[in-house]
Image (cartoon, helix red, strand yellow):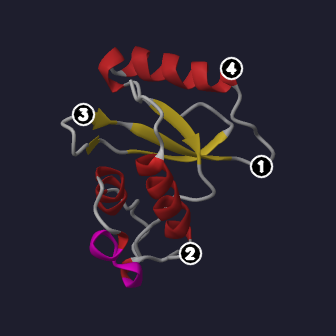
Amino acid sequence: MEGIDEIEDALVVGAEQPDGGYYMPMFVVLRGEAQLTEDLIERMKRQIRSRTSARHVPDEIISAPAIPKTHSNKRVEVPIKKLFAGTAPERAVNLASLANPESMRWFIDSAEQFHRSSKVRP
């Protein structure tokens, strides 16, 4: 999301679903008082399409309070992918490996809500 000033950090994961589907959300941490508006979402999607391709545009763009990172400051993608694929949190995440383990609670809650949701996914 380089060049989009409102975005401080971002992470995209692709999660295979138990029913054979695929869900690809992008989580963004907004800078300062920025809001995740429809205009901002469209600018992000346009940038992704122009710099990569339409197939890289996420299914959903979601504002997150923080992106979990390792002690070496790398984004934690695999545990989040596992959570959204349906793996139980205690099997998906080793909180001791995180520099900011409190950030993972939001992702655990969001994945659980995603799996409880009856919302039809694209």
Dot in front, 3 or 1: 3
Q: Residues within 10 Å of mark 3 (few under 14, many from 20)?
A: few
Residue type marked 3: Gly
Dot in front, 2 or 1: 2
Residue 105 screen position, x and y as percent: 53, 69
The disc label shown at residue 39, or none: 4
Residue highlighted by disc 2? 102
Residue 18 screen position, x and y as percent: 22, 45
The relative height of residue 32 versus residue 21 in the rendered view (above or below) is: below
Q: Which residues are magenta?
A: 90-96
Dot in front, 4 or 3: 3
Q: Secondary structure at mark 3?
A: loop
Q: Residue at x 32, y 68 (%)?
A: 88
Residue highlighted by disc 3? 21
Residue type marked 4: Asp
Residue highlighted by disc 1? 32
Quick check: 88 left or right of 105? left
